[in-house]
Each structure stands twice: as C-alpha cells, then as structure tokens.
Image: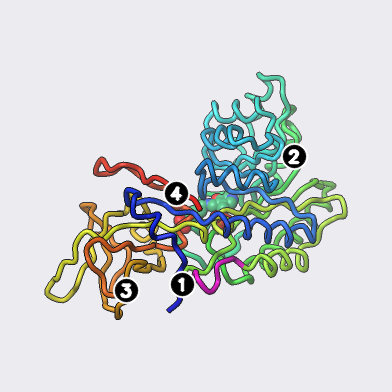
C-alpha cells in the first residue's frame, strides 16, 4: 500500500498530537481551483470555518480568494489575515447585533440573509449607522444532497434559508426597507458531496427561481451557490484533490446566467481537507478479549469528526513497515465515542509509533476543544 510522504525525522522533536500541513499540496490545490474556476470567471470565497489557521489563511489570501464568514470572529480573522472587506460574505441563521454592526462598519461585500426577521434587524442597524446593507437571500432550494444528515442543509426541514413559498413576501418586505439593497441569491445544499447530480439539481432549481423572479421584474447581479464539494477520504494518496474541473463544468453547463451576472462559490473542505494530517503517537497497545486497541495520544478533542459524524479518515502507521494487524484506534478521552477507527488494519504497531490521520485539514484543528482540560493541538508546516 502506498503511504503519504512525511518528514518523519523532523517529527521526532515535536510534541504530539499536532496538525501537519502539506503546503505544497495546498498550493497545488489553489492553483487548480484558480485555473478551473478562471475558465468561467467564477468568484471563489474560502469558507473560513473549515480552517482558520493563520498560515493557511495567509497562503489562501495570496491566491486572491475571497472569504465566506459565519461569525463576527471569522470576519475579524479574515480582516486580520489581510483579506479585502469587499471580498467577504457573511452568512448564518443567527447573526447577533454586534456582528451585523461589525460587518456593516467593515463594508463587507454582502450579507447572506436567512429570514425576514433578520432582514428587519439588519435594516434597523444599517439605518442607525447610516449605511445600506447589500444582501443576498439564502433560498432553501429543497434539493437533497444525499450526504450525512448533520451536514445536509438544503431541505425544507432544515433551519437554513428562506423556503421558496416565502420568497415573494420576503422580496415585498425588502421593497419596504430603505437600508437594504438586494444584490444576490444564495444557496448551499450541504457538505462532502461527491456525486455531481445534486449540484445539477441545484442549477435547475436556480434557473426556475430566476425565471419566476424575472417575470415579476426582479433581477440580481450575483448568484452564490455555496460550497459542498467533497473529497476522497478513502484514498488520500491516490486522489489527493477534489474534482474541481468537473464541478465547475457542471455549473457552466447547467446554470443559466445573464452576461452581467457573476457566480460565486464558498468552498471550504475541498480547499484544505487533503493538505492536513493529525499526527499522533501510540501510547499503549492494549489486548482486550476480542479486540486489540491502539491507544493514541490524540483524541476527539483534537479531531471530532469520527466521534460526531462517524466520519472515516484514512490512518497510516508512518513508523512501521511490518505486516498488517487489526486494531481499534482510540484516544484517551473519557468517552466511548473517542474512537478514530474500528477493526482497522495498520502495519504492526508498537508504543512510540507515529500514526497519520489523513485528510484532516478541514473541520479538524478548528473544531478542537479543551475538554478534559487538554491543550489545543499545535500545527507544523512543510
Ligand atoms: N457555505 C455555507 C453556507 C456553509 O454552511 C458551509 C459549510 C460552506 C459554505 C462550506 O462547505 P464545504 O465546502 O466545506 O462543504 N463540520 C462538518 C462540516 C460542516 C459544514 C458546514 N457548512 C464536517 O466536519 O464534515
């Protein structure tokens, strides 16, 4: 089996667990995104929620991407990293007043608005600050993304977005609000989507919505289709990059845009997931009655995805070339869900070996917690 290449000698002096980021892969990924989206002049916002590590942000900023934020903290981090405020979009079902004020004062590009209640508050705050808030309406297209139920967002039963039946009344409200300017429509159907057909369905839905709106004289200058492009978690060494070419082509082929309309994306996982690995040391091999456990020093506090979503991450013993043996790979946290993998084949493993938990660059470090009063994982770059 091919393994990832890791500078294992350099790892010896670093306190585990830590995140290792392959900046060469990140740069290659960004170059590919630029090339493929550039074919159609699409505008890409990096979904900063996936990873806000300062070095990662610096690399992404240099490539000229915008940012998609979902909190005041993320807007501050984006501005601090040097992203231009006019490249920032701000989404989220529960924007607090101070966050709206911060975004208005920073003159961000656009609010992605999720309800009429929110529109009224943004209007009030904008009036007080003597500003006009540019908004895109986040519409719930009721498209099934066929992904994990915790990360599907585009169904009517989800808390996100404005349902289609409420669109006309929302637009009528906007017409009555003096400090709101409608400039776009926003969509996001879910995350880790590898089958392109939900994106095709989304395009067709958007075409219908735009055609209906046009009949009532409403047009917007941009469409934002959110993020969601998945990566291959099973084979990080063979398929280290998401299929950006096919993804952007789907939108080019299926979505009808006017010549003056721009298309925006909010990609998170596909940008950063492949470049990150969580490196952890084996503390003990514990022989159970039916199982053999590899107990490692990383836990669900460092990478919560397996515990929270039952997510699969490819794991390699980067210190061993011996024959494969079966292990449950578990962390030290006092929760049974603190398990990275069950019945998993690793090269024969011993105390002190280093394991690489792959494809952890997105929703890994950023979701770390201090539960059990553990320290947050550090990061290391190459
Ligand atoms: N835009 C909006 C409105 C979103 O809600 C999200 C992700 C994105 C863009 C970026 O989606 P991406 O390209 O990364 O799929 N913690 C979960 C994923 C949560 C995704 C939340 N929203 C995980 O570890 O799988």
**Residue appearing at x 27%, y 54% in the figure:** 297
Name the residue that disc number 2 marks: 182
Query: Mark 4 or mark 3, which is nearer the start of the sequence?
Result: 3
* Residue 188 appears in the picture as rendered: no
Q: Position of residue 166 (x, y in %)?
A: 65, 48
Left/right placement of residue 76 relative to residue 212 reads: left
The answer to whether the residue labelled 1 contacts the one labelled 2, judged by CB atoms less than 8 Å apart, is: no
Q: Are marks 4 and 1 in contact (CB under 8 Å)?
A: no
The Cα–Cα distance between marks 3 and 4, rounded to whole angstroms, is: 24 Å
- Residue 343 at least partly seen: yes
Residue 231 colored in magenta in the image: no
Q: Nearer the viewer, mark 3 or mark 4?
A: 4
Relative image position of residue 157 (x, y in whole percent):
51, 56
Q: Earlier in the sequence, mark 3 or mark 2?
A: 2
Residue nearest the viewer, comparing 283 with 78: 283
- The relative height of residue 357 versus residue 100 in the rendered view (above or below) is below
Q: How many marks?
A: 4
Q: Answer with mark 2 or mark 4, whichever residue precedes in sequence.
A: 2
Q: Position of residue 85 (x, y in %)?
A: 68, 34
Q: What percent of the width, then of the height, locates residue 305?
A: 39, 57
Q: CA distance from mark 2 to mark 4?
A: 43 Å
Quadrant in the rendering for residue 131: top right
The numbered disc on residue 234 is 1
Spatial CA distance of label 4 from label 1 is 24 Å
Q: CA distance from mark 1 to mark 3?
A: 14 Å
Q: Is residue 15 above or below residue 238?
A: above
Q: Secondary structure at mark 1?
A: loop
- What span is colored magenta in the figure? 236-242
C-beta proximity under 8 Å, tags 2 and 4: no
Residue at 43 percent of width and 47 percent of height? 379
Tell me the number on the disc at residue 346: 3
């Amino acid at each position: 089996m091919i393994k990832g290449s890791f500078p294992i000698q350099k790892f010896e002096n670093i306190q585990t667990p830590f995140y290792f980021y392959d900046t060469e892969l990140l740069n290659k990924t960004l170059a590919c995104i630029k090339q493929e989206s550039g074919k159609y002049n699409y505008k890409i916002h990096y979904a900063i929620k996936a990873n806000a590590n300062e070095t990662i942000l610096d690399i992404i900023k240099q490539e000229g991407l915008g940012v998609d934020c979902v909190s005041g903290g993320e807007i501050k981090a984006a501005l601090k990293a040097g992203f231009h405020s006019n490249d920032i979009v701000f989404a989220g079902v529960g924007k607090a007043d101070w966050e709206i004020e911060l975004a208005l004062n920073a003159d961000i590009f656009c609010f992605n608005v999720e309800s009429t209640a929110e529109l009224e508050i943004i209007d009030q705050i904008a009036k007080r600050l003597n500003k006009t808030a540019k908004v895109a309406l986040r519409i719930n297209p009721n498209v099934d993304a066929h992904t994990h139920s915790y990360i599907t967002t585009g169904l009517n039963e989800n808390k996100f977005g404005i349902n289609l039946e409420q669109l006309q009344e929302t637009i009528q409200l906007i017409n009555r609000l003096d400090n709101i300017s409608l400039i776009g429509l926003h969509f996001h159907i879910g995350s880790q989507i590898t089958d392109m057909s939900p994106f095709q369905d989304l395009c067709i839905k958007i075409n219908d919505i735009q055609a209906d709106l046009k009949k009532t004289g409403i047009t917007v200058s941009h469409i934002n289709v959110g993020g969601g492009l998945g990566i291959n978690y099973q084979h990080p060494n063979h398929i280290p990059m998401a299929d950006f070419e096919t993804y952007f082509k789907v939108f080019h082929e299926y979505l009808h845009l006017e010549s003056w309309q721009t298309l925006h994306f909010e990609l998170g996982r596909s940008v950063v997931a492949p470049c990150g690995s969580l490196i952890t040391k084996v503390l003990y091999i514990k022989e159970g009655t039916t199982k053999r456990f590899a107990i490692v020093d990383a836990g669900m506090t460092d990478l919560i995805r397996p515990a929270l979503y039952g997510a699969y991450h490819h794991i390699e013993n980067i210190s061993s070339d011996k024959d494969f043996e079966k292990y449950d790979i578990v962390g030290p946290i006092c929760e049974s869900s603190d398990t990275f993998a069950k019945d998993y084949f690793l090269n024969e493993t011993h105390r002190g070996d280093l394991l690489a938990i792959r494809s952890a660059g997105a929703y890994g470090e950023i979701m770390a917690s201090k539960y059990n009063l553990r320290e947050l994982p550090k990061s290391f770059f190459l």
